[in-house]
Image (spheres, rainbow, N blue to C red):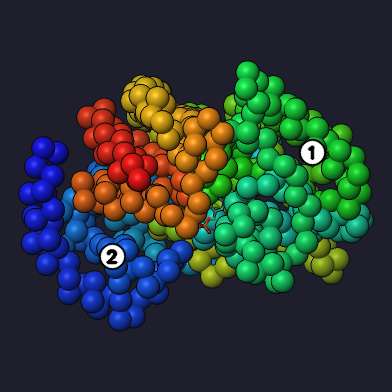
Amino acid sequence: MANHREDHATIDLMTTGNAPYVARDLAHVWHPCTQMKDHEQNVPLIPIRRGQGVWLEDYSGRRYLDAISSWWVNLFGHAYPRIIAALREQVDKLEQVILAGFTHEPVIELSEALVAIAPEGLTRCFYADNGSAAVEVAVKMSFHYWRNVGRSAKRRFITLSNSYHGETLGALAVGNVELYKEIYQPLLMDVITVPSPDCYEREAGESWAEHSRRKFAHMEATLARHAHEVAAVIVEPLVQCAGTMRMYDPVYLELLRDACNRYEVHLIADEIAVGFGRTGTMFACEQAHIRPDFMCLSKGLTAGYLPLSAVMTTEAVYAAFYDEYEKLNAFLHSHSFTGNPLACAVARACLGIFREDNVLERNRALAAHMGARARELEEHPHVAEVRQRGMIVAIELVRDKATRAPYAWQERRGLVIYRHAIERGVLLRPVGNVVYFMPPYVITPDEIDLMVEVAREGIELATCG
Ligand SMILES: *Cc1c(COP(=O)(O)O)cnc(C)c1O
């Protein structure tokens, strides 16, 4: 750190190992969620040749601490021996088979294991291969359920403002992040949007629980008015991750579960980002002691090793589709790689690690350390809030701390932090003006210190002018 100058010189030299890959990539690869022109100047493209634990290594030998778990998917670091062993073992037996009419041990065992740890009553598992597809499945299943039970007027969905549920058209429609959604609006189904219980917006002196409870009035009123035409309410339990890691109190979920029962509306819990220990419990819903009607899982489901997703649901939902073939009540939805054996074998191994290694217990100490270090930034003149839920910590930057006036998005303050962190060997990827940490669970306290220190430097740089 003392040799900041020298560091820069070294980087320039070292990155020459990356150069050939960057040139070849930019000739043909169109990257996700990227303005490709940014790679000319603003954003370096970094080719990664290997990963080990929390570290990624590029072709010049530079290492980057993966503070965002490779886009929120990785749980136990890269190249984790037990996961690799599980994958090796399965690949020698069976790499893929059609799941219609056929089955295999990994998908059976994974389903048993998921049912055993999910909120009680979620006994049926439907598989897809990414998070958005799981959301599509839940949305279609809920709609189709109401049709099968003779209530086909129930075909709309209620969503929260600032929510995110993926990028395919159905998932995009039930989400609410402007940046991703606005352009495609003409293609999307019409949903009912209710104000988020986001506790960043709480009044001075108001507790998280009070705020979330107060915000529930909007949901209650909307359900009272629209329940007859609503199939389901979809939420990200506790943390709206893509919506800049905004958080709310579990009481909201308790109230929502109760209201969905009263109004006969399904509750879809999108635990794609928050599931598998991210918020401190295995599933975020547990903190509200509720069982959703549909629970969408992906990302950490395979510890971030292979694409897989699951929608878990109840016997009641399952039963509404179980009928004579001629009734045409079956759920005729499929993806080529539904229940892929390799992905299921890895997911099964991942759940084994949770069981055997007391992961949630160990994470408590890590989360406490990460939160304590991050909260040291609360005093910073451009930090409005440091918030945390388990293994997710977010730092909200503002132009004016007193009024909480945000920085204009065009200023791209987060990009300054991203670039600084990359130079210092940490992969941070702020969303808007929010810097966050969502590291793999194998991070050490020293690595947490490094991650927070680099974020602090980045914040200094990004807010000094
Ligand atoms: C990432 C995410 C999705 C979409 O998953 P993909 O695999 O990227 O399609 C859906 N919902 C939430 C809450 C997510 O964070």
| Residue 19 screen position, x and y as percent | 17, 71
Which element is circle 2 on?
Answer: loop
Q: What residue is at 12 percent from the left and 66 percent from the top?
A: 17
Residue 432: percent from the left, percent from the top? 47, 50
Q: Residue 191 falls in which quadrant of the image?
A: bottom right
Hey, what amino acid is under mark 2? Leu
Residue pictured at 40% horizontal, 25% vertical: 379
Q: Is residue 139 above or below residue 336?
A: above
Mark 1 C-beta to ligand 1 under 8 Å: no
Label 1 sits on a secondary structure element that is: helix
Q: Is there CB contact under 8 Å for labels 1 and 2?
A: no
- Residue 107: mark: none
Residue lying at 50% horizontally and 51% vertically, measured from the top left: 408
Instruction: Using the rendered view, name the quadrant where residue 41 is placed.
Output: bottom left
Q: Residue 219 — which label?
A: 1
Is residue 124 placed above or below 200 in the rendered structure?
Answer: below
Q: Earlier in the sequence, mark 1 or mark 2?
A: 2
Sort mark 1 into few (<14), some (14-19) or many (20+) by Cα contacts within 10 Å: many
Residue placed farthest to the top in the image? 205
Instruction: Give the numbered dot on residue 45.
Output: 2
* Quadrant containing the N terminus in the rendered view: top left
Q: Answer yes or no: is residue 275 visible.
A: no
Q: Residue shown at 37%/73% (left/top)?
A: 37
